[in-house]
Image (spheres, rainbow, N blue to C red):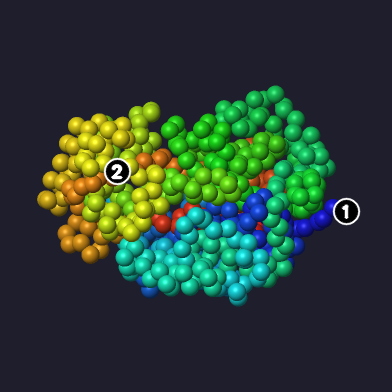
């Protein structure tokens, strides 16, 4: 016997759960399906922060829709002005809705700057929100099925600002939280959203993979909508095959679970299945050359592109992603696959630089990770990048898989002198020696004349707060010396079906396909290559998830 729901949400990340929360609280019979065995997708693997401009908090005083729009207009693609305006207007509404219908509480980060401090409308804090700790013991049992990333620690952002480095961490407190089931970050965000979704009456199932969306008579591509009309439209991306949607509406989904394949009837389907970059073939074919690793959940395989292909829907922004330099510590696994770690805070502290194989710096190391990622894309084909640091760094600052009091892991190379280190990592020794000498001179002067590291509020935020002067500069002069390979990575691709301001998937005629929505990294992100501030990915996904859920329930 087939099941019937009003709304099926495919994907259990923050965007999908927000859509499900909006639909279920509106009275719609709602089902959430997740292909993995755990809840949360890529959202649970991240920091959980959300970027909410013009939010009305005292810490955000002076901000406004006008300022936020001015800022975003300089970063995003202004062809999508309606999407920008909708996001700025509705993000705070979404946040209030989430707090009303779930135990999640947004905690403002008053000192966390926007990423582009040189743009009009940027703020030095107050737009980013962290996750208040949640106690799994007080949530629905399903919350215990939320996935956790390798090396997870239930620390809040305010605590990180206070403690910063391993020597200052309250390890007893963090260990107690882990044992008691208190969670923060992406894990806490997803757990709190999930609690709201379940209490609103929605059904949530793991191990249930979306195979396709049905329209018309439910034949898989529905009412002949899968037939190629010979126009050849949409073939340029290698994803859309030229089929066109002429009529029809969503009637359900085809899924696979432990009992095999079956059909679930629904009048609305929200695609919140995440990015496509966990699929090696799509990542290598569509994203920039040299992109080595993905931190998306392994379940982010691009099913939304398959749905768009089946239904002849236009897709966009396939070559863009949320870029991130990454490390690859040994033994870190997610769903049995090696999992990289993003490099964010580590690049702002003193006593380290990043060089290419010629031993030369190529970027402000402390730059926002999206901009650092773009710089890596500009490296010559086959080039590599290494973070170079000394014993002074080793004694004070952490890296993924490395703490000051821990053993040296396999992904860290060491040498008694710079020449030995260069030989071991395949970097030009003369180039490295000259670069370190030049860097040390900048540190003595307090100014990075090559890339101006530490000269803006964002860089300074991640510098060492206990260091006077430029908090991002520090010499590399205490042997032994160390190197860690830095990989060009992505924390989510941005390509998918084109949508409108309600999250509705559009046909080639720019009209909504009745009953189909796409949100988060499953949709075509109108942000293009922009990244305005910490938590923007989740903010956009959750805001349009909220709007899609409301519309789907009507």
Along the line of sight, which residue is nearer the eye, 388 or 66? Answer: 388
* Residue shown at 32% from the left, 35% from the top: 425
**Disc 1 element:** loop
For residue 502, above or below residue 314: below
- Hey, which quadrant is residue 191 in on the image? bottom right
Specify whether 345 is left or right of 150: left
Residue 53 appears at what percent x and percent y? 43, 62
Residue 553 appears at what percent x and percent y? 70, 60
Cβ–Cβ below 8 Å for labels 1 and 2?
no
Mark 1 or 2, nearer chain start: 1
Along the line of sight, which residue is nearer the eye, 162 or 59? Answer: 162
Q: Which mark is residue 361?
A: none
Specify whether 515 is left or right of 472: right
For residue 225, above or below residue 249: above
Mark count: 2
Residue 90 appears at what percent x and percent y? 52, 61
* Residue shown at 70% from the left, 24% from the top: 230
Can you identify the residue that label 1 sits on?
1
Along the line of sight, which residue is nearer the eye, 52 or 210? Answer: 210
For residue 83, above or below residue 489: below
* Residue shown at 81% from the left, 43% from the top: 218
Specify whether 481 is left or right of 317: left
Q: Which mark is residue 414?
A: 2
* Residue shown at 40% from the left, 40% from the top: 487
**Disc 2 element:** strand
Along the line of sight, which residue is nearer the eye, 528 or 10? Answer: 10
Residue at the bottom extreme?
Answer: 138
- Residue 181 seen in render: yes
Gap in angstroms between the C-alphas marked 1 and 2: 63 Å
Check disc 2: other Cα within 10 Å, few if <14, some if 14-19, many if 20+. Answer: many
Quadrant placement of the C terminus? bottom right
């Amino acid at each position: 016997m087939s099941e019937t729901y009003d709304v099926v949400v495919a994907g259990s990340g923050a965007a999908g759960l927000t859509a499900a929360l909006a639909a279920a609280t509106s009275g719609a019979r709602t089902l959430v399906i997740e292909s993995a065995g755990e809840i949360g997708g890529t959202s649970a693997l991240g920091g959980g922060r959300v970027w909410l401009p013009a939010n009305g908090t005292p810490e955000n005083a002076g901000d406004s829709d006008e300022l936020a729009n001015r800022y975003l207009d300089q970063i995003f693609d202004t062809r999508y002005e309606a999407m920008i305006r909708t996001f700025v207007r509705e993000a705070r509404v979404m946040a209030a809705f989430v707090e009303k219908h779930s135990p999640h509480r947004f905690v403002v980060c008053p000192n966390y700057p926007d990423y582009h401090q040189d743009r009009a409308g940027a703020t030095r804090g107050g737009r980013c929100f962290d996750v208040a700790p949640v106690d799994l013991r007080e949530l629905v049992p399903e919350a215990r099925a939320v996935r956790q990333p390798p090396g997870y620690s239930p620390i809040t952002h305010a605590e990180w600002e206070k403690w910063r480095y391993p020597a200052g961490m309250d390890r007893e407190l963090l260990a107690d939280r882990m044992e008691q089931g208190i969670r923060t970050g992406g894990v806490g965000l997803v757990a709190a959203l999930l609690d709201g979704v379940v209490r609103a009456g929605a059904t949530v199932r793991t191990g249930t993979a979306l195979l396709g969306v049905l329209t018309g008579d439910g034949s898989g591509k529905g009412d002949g909508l899968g037939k190629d009309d010979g126009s050849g439209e949409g073939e340029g991306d290698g994803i859309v095959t030229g089929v066109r949607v002429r009529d029809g509406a969503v009637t359900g989904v085809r899924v696979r679970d432990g009992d095999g394949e079956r059909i679930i009837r629904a009048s609305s389907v929200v695609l919140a299945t995440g990015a496509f970059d966990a699929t090696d073939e799509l990542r290598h074919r569509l994203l920039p050359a040299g992109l080595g690793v993905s931190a998306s959940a392994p379940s982010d395989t691009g099913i939304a592109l398959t749905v768009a292909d089946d239904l002849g829907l236009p897709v966009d922004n396939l070559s863009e992603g949320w870029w991130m330099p990454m490390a690859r510590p040994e033994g870190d696994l997610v769903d049995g696959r090696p999992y990289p770690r993003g490099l964010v805070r580590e690049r702002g502290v003193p006593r380290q630089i990043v060089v290419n194989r010629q031993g030369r710096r190529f970027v402000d190391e402390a730059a926002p990770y999206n901009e650092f990622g773009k710089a890596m894309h500009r490296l010559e084909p086959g080039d590599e990048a290494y973070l170079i640091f000394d014993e002074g760094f080793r004694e004070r600052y952490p890296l993924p898989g490395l703490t000051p009091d821990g053993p040296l892991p396999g992904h860290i190379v060491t040498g008694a002198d710079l020449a030995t280190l260069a030989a071991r990592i395949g970097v030009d020794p003369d180039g490295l020696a000259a670069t370190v000498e030049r860097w040390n001179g900048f540190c003595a002067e307090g100014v990075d004349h090559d890339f101006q590291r530490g000269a803006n509020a964002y860089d300074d935020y991640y510098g060492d707060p206990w260091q006077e002067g430029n908090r991002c500069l520090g010499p590399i002069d205490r042997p032994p010396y160390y190197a860690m390979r830095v990989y060009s990575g992505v924390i989510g691709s941005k390509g998918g079906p084109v949508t409108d301001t309600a999250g509705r998937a559009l046909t080639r005629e720019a009209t909504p396909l009745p009953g189909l929505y796409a949100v988060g990294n499953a949709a075509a992100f109108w942000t293009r290559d922009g990244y305005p501030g910490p938590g923007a990915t989740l903010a956009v996904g959750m805001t349009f998830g909220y709007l899609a859920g409301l519309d789907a329930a009507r």
